[in-house]
Amino acid sequence: MPMISIWQALGLLLLSKILFGGGGHFKNKWKGAWSDHMKEKIEGMSTEEKERCRLQWEKRCGQWKDEKQA
């Protein structure tokens, strides 16, 4: 087998973390930050903006239901 450089080894390590999991602490940290950001963004929207956003999500992802309606 050929030798790989340290950068290639680090790249493989990063790729394996992405593909096979691991690094759960960072994953949860970013998920929480994203969730907080989106909550703040939605709270600042008018009713019309929220409806437009909901329609865009339906268009991109299919049917989108509010948990209260389900």
Image (cartoon, grey):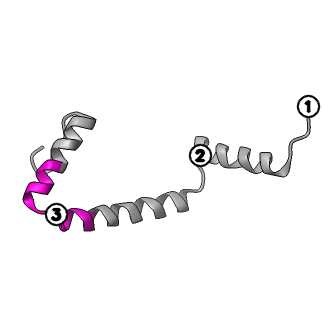
- Residue 33: quarter of image: bottom left
Q: State the SS at label 1.
A: loop
- Which residue was labeled with disc 3? 45
Bin the neighbour count of mark 2 within 10 Å (Cα to Cα): few under 14, some 14-19, many 20 and up. Answer: few
The residue mark sitting in front, 2 or 3, is: 3
Q: Are marks 2 and 3 in contact (CB under 8 Å)?
A: no
Q: Amino acid at mark 3?
A: Met
Disc number for residue 1: 1
- Along the line of sight, the residue nearer the viewer: 25 or 63: 63
8 horizontally vs 35: left or right: right
Q: Position of residue 14 (x, y in %)?
A: 67, 49
Disc number for residue 18: 2
Q: Position of residue 22 (x, y in %)?
A: 60, 51
Q: Position of residue 55 (x, y in %)?
A: 16, 42
- Confirm whether the magenta stretch covers residue 65: no
> For the residues marked 1 and 2, what is the alpha-carbon distance in whole angstroms?
24 Å
Q: Position of residue 54 (x, y in %)?
A: 17, 47
Q: State the SS at label 3.
A: loop
Q: Amino acid at mark 2?
A: Ile
Q: Are marks 3 and 1 in contact (CB under 8 Å)?
A: no
Q: Residue furthest top?
A: 1
Q: Amino acid at mark 1?
A: Met
51 horizontally vs 30: left or right: left
Q: State the SS at label 2.
A: helix
Which stretch is magenta? 39-52
Q: Main secondary structure of the magenta part?
A: helix
Image quadrant in which the N terminus is located: top right
- Along the line of sight, the residue nearer the viewer: 48 or 23: 48
